[in-house]
């Protein structure tokens, strides 16, 4: 009886030994030099996650969070950023808020962390603390924001730290990382895989040559299947998931807000703004903003500084070059509004709707011809100009591919001509479906501009009964005189 059991076990062991030996030889033949800690047991993840995993100067892998900022007990700058504490959070060490009248917890992503702001004093949490002090409010900020984190990761951190901090206010600045598309797993699925990989039995199996060789083969196959996917943001891309599906994002936000309320705290939500020159696909954040506002209206206070919104032609001044991280000036705007919110907390007077007006600086849009020039008479301070009358023809302005939801609308173009020529100088139009559908168009002769060197306004009325994902406004230059474009305004028309 024992032999009947022993022989099959021995046979299995021999087969496994043979597979291990064959895998060892195979790895030697291909010149494999071993997996790094970051590569071992990794699931296919979104480009934003890959970016942060590679940013070893600032972040480290984490089984529970995918990645997090490196703990920094020494106090020296980490990845160029000042004031990263021993827990990997930006700001002072967490501890008792001695003498503080108000405890404020910040739950956010790179915007709360202060991306591209090396000096801690430039970040909006630090600036808010100073502004509150100027109002006579001694506040203590506990900033748990982590660059690259989604609402799913933020919720894990929130649930770990909320009861320890017991804050009076919780400020949420989230959403950007949720909307990134991924050809692999969502954040929730990735963390499940990482937890399985952390099991001792799985770790033991992962240490074998057989596991490594099979993993390499599967990784190569997966890489081939991913090759057709672009790195982009937005909901509903064919064959793609988002890091956190929209409904789950809103569920995460609601769960955190409800816990704050149950414990007697006050939730404040920053609806992420962006500059008009931001990647058009990042404008998917409008869906997130609208969904969060709809679900949590009446439960939280919302912050949306108007200078940083699309209706301000100079909103680009408040962002870094990527168009969605606040620079020091943008951080100060946020800090000012947040200090006002903390000292006069109220949930009345909301005005948020899905954006129904955009003022688009021409200089921030794509182009085929022309360049940029400072102009004190411009609403944006900078114009898009083709100053050679004999320049080649082409698109002086196109884009910016905004999401447009209202039925009746008007596009207003502000331009000026260097001379009042007889023939056509420019064609303006509004299109959808990446130029395949023309909603309105007008060709302008030089004399339509009224006076050379003076700004003229031209309107196009158009209708979009169904929402348009990528509405585009264009100016086509025909030649014959110089032409400047200032701003283009797209607004819904009340019926």
Image: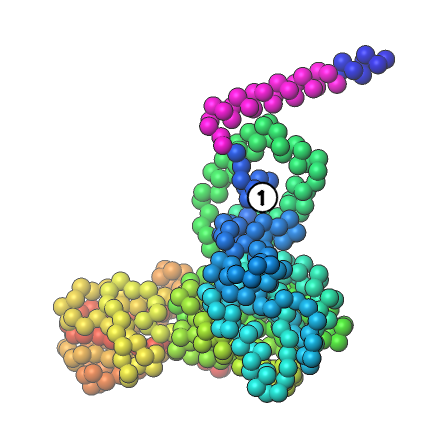
SS at badge 1: loop
* Quadrant housing residue 378: bottom left
Asked whether 344 or 100 is in front, the reply is 100
Say if 53 sits above or below 111 in the image: above
Give whichever of 302, 234 is nearer the camera: 302
Location of residue 359 (image quadrant): bottom left
Residue 77 appears left or right of 458? right
In the displayed orientation, state which residue is furthest to the right: 1
Q: Is residue 170 visible?
A: yes
Expressed as whole percent of the image width and height from the top left, the position of residue 166 reads 73, 71
Coordinates of residue 358 in the picture (x, y in percent): 43, 75
Residue drawn at 46 percent across, 80 percent down? 307
The local crowd at label 1, few if under 14, some if 14 to 19, many if 20 or more residues have their Cα within 10 Å, is: some
Using the image as rendered, state which of residue 162 and residue 282 is in the foreground.
162
* Residue 284 seen in this snapshot: no
Quick check: is 21 in the magenta stretch?
A: yes
Residue under label 1, please give it: 43
Number of marks present in the image shown = 1
Kindly identify the residue that appears in the image at 61 percent across and 48 percent down.
190
* Residue sitting at x 71%, y 66%: 162
Tell me where residue 152 appears, x and y as whole percent: 63, 58
Instruction: Name the spot of residue 47 as percent of width and height, x first.
Output: 49, 51
Task: Locate residue 295 relative to residue 289 in the image: left or right.
Answer: right
Tell me what residue is drawn at x 49 percent, y 35 percent: 220
Stretch in magenta: 9-33
Judged by its main secondary structure, the magenta piece is helix
Image quadrant holding the N terminus, namely top right
Please state which of residues 475 and 132 is positioned toward the viewer in this rendering.
Answer: 132
In the picture shown, does residue 408 fall above or below 209?
Answer: below
């Amino acid at each position: 009886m024992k032999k009947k059991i022993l022989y099959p076990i021995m046979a299995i062991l021999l087969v496994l030994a043979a597979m291990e030996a064959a895998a060892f030889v195979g790895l030697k033949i291909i010149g494999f030099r071993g997996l790094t800690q970051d590569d071992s047991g990794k699931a296919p993840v979104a480009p934003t996650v890959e970016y942060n995993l590679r940013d070893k100067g600032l972040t480290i892998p984490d089984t529970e969070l995918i990645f997090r900022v490196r703990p920094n007990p020494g106090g020296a700058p980490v990845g160029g950023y000042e004031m990263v504490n021993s827990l990997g959070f930006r700001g002072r060490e967490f501890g008792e808020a001695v003498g503080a009248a108000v405890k404020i917890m910040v739950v956010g992503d790179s915007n709360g962390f202060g991306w591209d702001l090396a000096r801690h004093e430039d970040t909006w949490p630090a600036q808010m603390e100073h502004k509150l002090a100027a109002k006579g409010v001694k506040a203590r900020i506990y900033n748990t924001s982590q660059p690259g984190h989604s609402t799913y990761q933020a919720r894990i951190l929130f649930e770990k730290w909320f009861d320890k901090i017991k804050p009076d206010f919780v400020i949420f600045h989230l959403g950007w990382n949720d909307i990134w598309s991924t050809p692999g797993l969502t954040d929730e699925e990735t963390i499940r895989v990482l937890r399985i990989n952390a099991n001792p039995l799985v770790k033991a199996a992962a240490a074998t040559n057989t596991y490594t060789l099979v993993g390499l083969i599967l990784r190569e196959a997966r890489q081939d299947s991913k090759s057709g996917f672009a790195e982009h943001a937005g909901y509903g891309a064919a064959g793609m998931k988002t890091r956190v599906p929209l409904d789950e994002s809103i569920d995460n936000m609601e769960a955190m807000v409800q816990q704050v309320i149950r414990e007697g705290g006050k939730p404040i939500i920053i609806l992420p703004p962006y500059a008009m020159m931001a990647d058009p696909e990042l404008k998917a954040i409008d869906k997130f903003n609208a969904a969060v506002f709809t679900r949590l209206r009446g439960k939280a206070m919302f912050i949306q500084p108007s200078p940083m919104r699309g209706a301000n032609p100079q909103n680009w001044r408040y962002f870094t070059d990527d168009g969605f991280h606040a620079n020091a000036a943008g951080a100060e705007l946020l800090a000012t509004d947040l200090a006002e919110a903390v000292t006069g907390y109220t949930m009345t007077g909301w005005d948020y709707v899905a954006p129904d007006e955009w003022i688009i600086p021409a200089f921030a849009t794509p182009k085929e011809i022309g360049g940029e020039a400072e102009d004190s008479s411009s609403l944006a301070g900078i114009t898009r100009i083709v100053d050679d009358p004999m320049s080649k023809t082409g698109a002086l302005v196109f884009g910016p591919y905004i999401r447009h939801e209202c039925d009746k609308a008007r596009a207003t173009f502000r331009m000026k001509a260097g001379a009042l020529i007889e023939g056509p100088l420019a064609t303006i139009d509004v299109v959808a479906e990446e130029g395949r559908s023309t909603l309105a168009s007008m060709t302008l002769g030089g004399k339509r501009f009224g006076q050379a060197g003076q700004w003229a306004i031209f309107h196009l009325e158009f209708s979009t009964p169904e929402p348009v994902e990528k509405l585009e406004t264009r100016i086509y230059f025909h030649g014959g005189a110089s032409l400047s474009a200032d701003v283009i305004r797209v607004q819904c028309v009340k019926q």
